[in-house]
Amino acid sequence: MQKLRSHHLDQRPPFECIALLLQGGGALGAYQGGVYQALHESGLEPDWVAGISIGAINSAIIAGNAPQERLAKLRAFWEGITAHPAWDALSSLTHQFASGEAMRSWLNQSSASMALAAGAPGFFAPRIPTPWFSAPGSVGATSYYDTRDLKGTLERLVDFDRLNAGAMRLSVGAVNVRTGNFAYFDTTTDVIRPEHIMASGALPPGFPAIEIEGECYWDGGLISNTPLQWVVETSGAYMDTLAFQVDLWSALGEMPKDLIEVDVREKEIRFSSRTRAATDQFKHRQLLRGALSALLGKLPKTFESGPELELLRPYAGHKVYNLVELIYRSKHYEGSSKDYEFSRLSMEDHWRSGYDDAVRALRQPEIYERPTSLDGVSTFDFG
């Protein structure tokens, strides 16, 4: 496979839309920051960014800032929520003089325990009193943590006027608590506020449901942890698309050998994107689109109008899609607490991994070439 010498591009690839799709995964979301850094350096600024949970937060920061400010604001978010000066100094010193997987595992578990006990600054904090001592039906009775600090963080790091101006499309997914239905908040149809972003990441029972226009919402990852289907199937968004899907959970794994590994594997399966199955279904629909388009082109003029044709016409077309999937491959020492282990050491590791994987992907010229297959879809796996 021929590689480009650099991940910097001289011109935009031949696609109508550059999409960035960000999965949920808590503390692992720093990986997405590294991916965006590589895209930013290459000159590939997204036209459309869509996210679930922590992916929604990263998406909002990207869409809600000028291009020259996006990377700095992302770093400010991740450095802010992992700011534990005393613990960071101790863990860095310990890691320096006592390296190895066993020591790193201990550091990670200790950091995760600290997050459970004290929360993450600017993100979430333990409820006082605990939910068991709160009145039934109150917000405090339905979650272990208070996320009001996240609202202030989002207001500080995201220009919501700019975000809603529509220069970059933003979509974030959540679940209606009352109906159980999946919902997308999208800048083409909604005025996005901090509450919409918080709703996408309101994973129960840790975080409280967020009320929006009289309805309460939980984390979109409860139903689907990736926005791929929304981006490729949304009505009115049928475009030649180069999509970068950034997954924080791998569907592939090994048979667990103990209960700790069972816990890890269960979480990976539950939150992974099942991208291969979704992609196979999408390719089949693309073949049907092409066949329908060809058939409509062969109809005699006497059949060129009518309610049946008007119903079918939006589903016909020959648009193409390149799906570049970047997947974080967790280290063995991370364990089942990796999504709530908010240490600076792990954040930097995740960010670096995302950057390295994205640079490697961006150096492959094949990802910029329009598909020539009948279904018009090419997929590339990295990470």
Image (tube, helix red, strand yellow):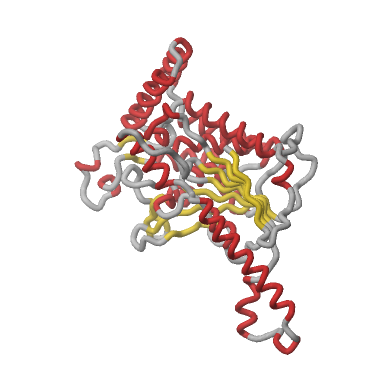
Residue at the bottom extreme, as displayed = 302
Instruction: Specify whether 219 is left or right of 369.
Output: left
Q: In the image, residue 324 lies at what x, y percent?
A: 62, 46
Q: In the image, residue 230 lies at what x, y percent?
A: 54, 58
Residue at the right extreme, as displayed = 10
Quarter of the picture containing the C terminus is top right
Of residue 381 and residue 113, the one placed in the foreground of this image is: 381
Regarding residue 61, the answer to whether it shows in the image is: yes
Seen at 45% across and 40% down, the residue is 253
Of residue 13 and residue 343, the one placed in the foreground of this image is: 13
Of residue 151 and residue 240, the one placed in the foreground of this image is: 240
Q: In the image, residue 228 lies at what x, y percent?
A: 55, 54
Q: How many marks?
A: 0
Quarter of the picture containing the N terminus is top right
Q: In the image, residue 325 lies at what x, y percent?
A: 59, 45
Residue at the top extreme, as displayed = 97
Seen at 36% across and 32% down, the residue is 119
Q: Can you tell which quarter of the image residue 62 is in? A: top right
Regarding residue 161, the answer to whether it shows in the image is: no
